[in-house]
Image (tube, rainbow, N blue to C red):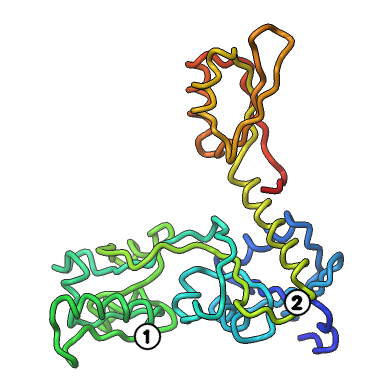
Amino acid sequence: MLSADSLEGRLLFAIPKKGRLHDKCLNLLSGADVQFRRHNRLDVALVLNHPIALVFLPAADIPSFVGKGNVDLGITGHDVVLESEMEPFVTEVLRLGFGRCSLQVQVPETSSYKTPSDLAGKRVVTSFKTLAGRYFANIDKELGLQEGKGTQIEYVGGSVEAACSLGLADGVVDLVESGETMRAAGLHAIGTVLETEAVLIQSRTQKKPEFAPAIEMLTKRIAGVIAAGRYVVMHYNISRDKLEGATAVTPGRKAPTVSPLEKDNWVAISVMVEKKKSAQVMDDLGKIGAEDIMVFNLDNCRV
């Protein structure tokens, strides 16, 4: 680690040092023009073009460092914020749209368990003991299980999916992204505890007021990068008598830009459209009577 003196006067921004969020975070920083050079075996990197220091930490630790330490901003999972019980200390400033997965209740495919309630009073293994404990405590309460006879929640730090086959658990609670690991272990999901994704978090306590402009700048840049990945710009021409129908198909984030054309009764429309819906939107516009429909990818934007 660099010395404390080298971090003086810099905004501290925590990034997951490895795992499923790490590479996505690096791409996000690149898109936000946060330039840095990380030396081998160092978990702090000084940003070259802003008074910022990147601190690479385990994702599970980031909410605590942001909420109770000197770190100003961080990127971690929504599930991690809840599991660490840091909601009173941090604010989720932005949902980032990547790292999406589900925290699910899983049981062996050959078992007789069909719903999470079937596991009440049984053994459940997880690395999310807080979230799983709350989830099954509600089930136990609904079923009227007496204290001492409720669901047993056991913590393991890894290999959660192996707990059933190795005789440690009747069911598990674990993150599911593609489901390949779950299926390979002979498990299937019977319930969802929560849906999660990567989030940008900030301390609820303003520690260094002088960094407020830098935090606002970073937040807007990151929001712009996320929007640029989610949206495309669609441009098309249409007659004014069909404008109402066309703008109903392409309302935009706020409103479309409408520009008159020299041709009588025709206008040009420029609008942001969700990338995943763009092909269907083009089809719908063609049916309405739009012409010269073009789509442009966004490198960056401000929203």
Residue shown at 83%/72% (left/top)? 51
Residue named by callout 2: 209
Q: Tell how many labels.
A: 2
For the residue pair 155 and 233, the one nearer the viewer reads as 233
For the residue pair 111 and 243, the one nearer the viewer reads as 243
**In what element is the residue under mark 2?**
helix
In the rendered structure, find residue 155 and report the number of the disc placed on it. Answer: 1
x and y percentages locating residue 207 in the rendered image: 70, 82
For the residue pair 3 and 42, the one nearer the viewer reads as 3
Q: Is residue 31 above or below residue 283?
A: below
Quadrant location of residue 265? top right
Task: Say if mark 2 contacts mark 1, CB within 8 Å.
Answer: no
Q: Earlier in the sequence, mark 2 or mark 1?
A: 1
Residue shown at 79%/75% (left/top)? 210
In the image: residue 206, left or right of residue 289:
right
For the residue pair 284 and 165, the one nearer the viewer reads as 284
Quadrant location of residue 299? top right
> Callout 1 environment at 10 Å: few (<14), some (14 to 19), or many (20+)?
some
In the rendered structure, find residue 5 and report the number of the disc placed on it. Answer: none
x and y percentages locating residue 52 in the rendered image: 79, 72
